[in-house]
Amino acid sequence: MNKLKYLLLFILCSHQLWAQPYSVNSLRWDSSLAQRPEYTFIISGHFYGDGFNKTHYPANTILGNIELLNSVDFTLCLGDLYRDVRYDHTFYKKHFYSQLKKPLLNAVGNHDISGSFYQDFIAPTFYRFKTLGVHHIVLDTELDDSSIEGEQLNSLKAGINAFNESTASYLMIYSHRPIWAEEDSVLQRVFSDNTQSDFGSNFQTDVEPLLQQINSGKQVYWFSGSMGAQPYAFFYQKREHIHYAITAIRGADKDAVLLAHYKDGSLNFQTHSLTGQKLLAFEDYTVDKFTTYEAPLEINYRLIPLWVKNTIFHRYFWYGVLVGLLVIFVVMNLKSKLKR
């Protein structure tokens, strides 16, 4: 009897995982997207910005672009939606989610997980859903430290099999950690600040073989949201017929999101700056742009008086002066003694 109960529960959960994406802002999902021939959604990540943001609010560039988030059918954040989920969630609900008119989905990152708080009060951490022509799989790369195992691996397998057997042309996989980059020596150097596993991932042994089973005529995109401090908001790499990408918000001038527009059976992507900057197509942000990047030397001369003032009035400056005077005094004494 227990086996039958668990089997029925698994079937029910599997169906629910397909049918219902979970919005963190509790807005009802528009079920017409499963049949609507045209729709647009945003892909981005790291909405809290960088580590200097201790306000309990999202990054300034996110709060300054609420109209953009409300102009699309849904937004998918690639993890680190919060800086500290337990403390930030109340502020987000009152001052961010209350302004959103469209569903916000999330592929959890390390900053979104604090015990079982996220699962208990916000949403499940991995699930699948469909829009017309596109299958979506949201992964939790925190659950098993960058590995996809157990129930989640079974869900991924089921999702890939269903996609292969369907008429859908596009599979979108979302995760916070770019687990597909962890064993790439070049990408490890470029993205050394990325959240990654302590003891290795099962991407190459258990996940990548599943991707290679997908019909080559279908398009597969894997988006991740852990990027560290980088000069660009996008990274793109193609391996065979699989497209891999990273995009993240840092609360900086470079901040941008990816607009995904589905129309007439085709899914197209457009980079959109949140600060009015001119951008390339996201496929142009390859590893070469990162390895050859040279940071411009920018000096704000009007800040020099402030820097001088802060230096002179800081105690460490005077510690240095005193140590320097002490060294000079000792050296002069030694010289005078040697002359005698």
Image (tube, helix red, strand yellow):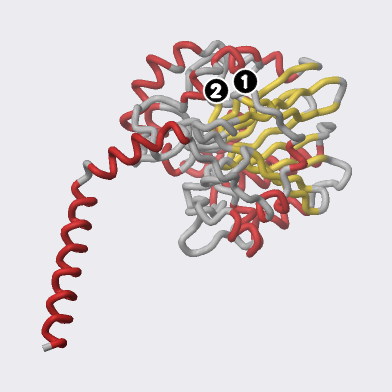
* Apparent side of residue 256 relative to residue 98 in the rendered image (left or right): right
Circle on res. 74 = 1
User: How many labels, in total?
Assistant: 2
Identity of the residue drawn at 46% across and 27% down: 59
Identity of the residue drawn at 60% across and 32% down: 44
Distance between the alpha carbons at the discs numbered 2 and 1: 6 Å
In the rendered image, residue 61, in percent from the top left (x then y), is placed at: 52, 24
- Residue type (three-letter) at the residue carrying disc 2: Leu
Report the residue marked by disc 2: 104
In this view, the residue in front, 141 or 168, is 141
Q: Residues within 10 Å of mark 1 (few under 14, many from 20)?
A: many
Quadrant position of the C terminus in the picture: bottom left
Q: In this view, does 71 lie above or below 131?
A: above
- Residue type (three-letter) at the residue carrying disc 1: Phe
Identity of the residue drawn at 77% across and 42% down: 284
* Apparent side of residue 137 relative to residue 113 in the rendered image (left or right): right
Identity of the residue drawn at 77% across and 35% down: 281
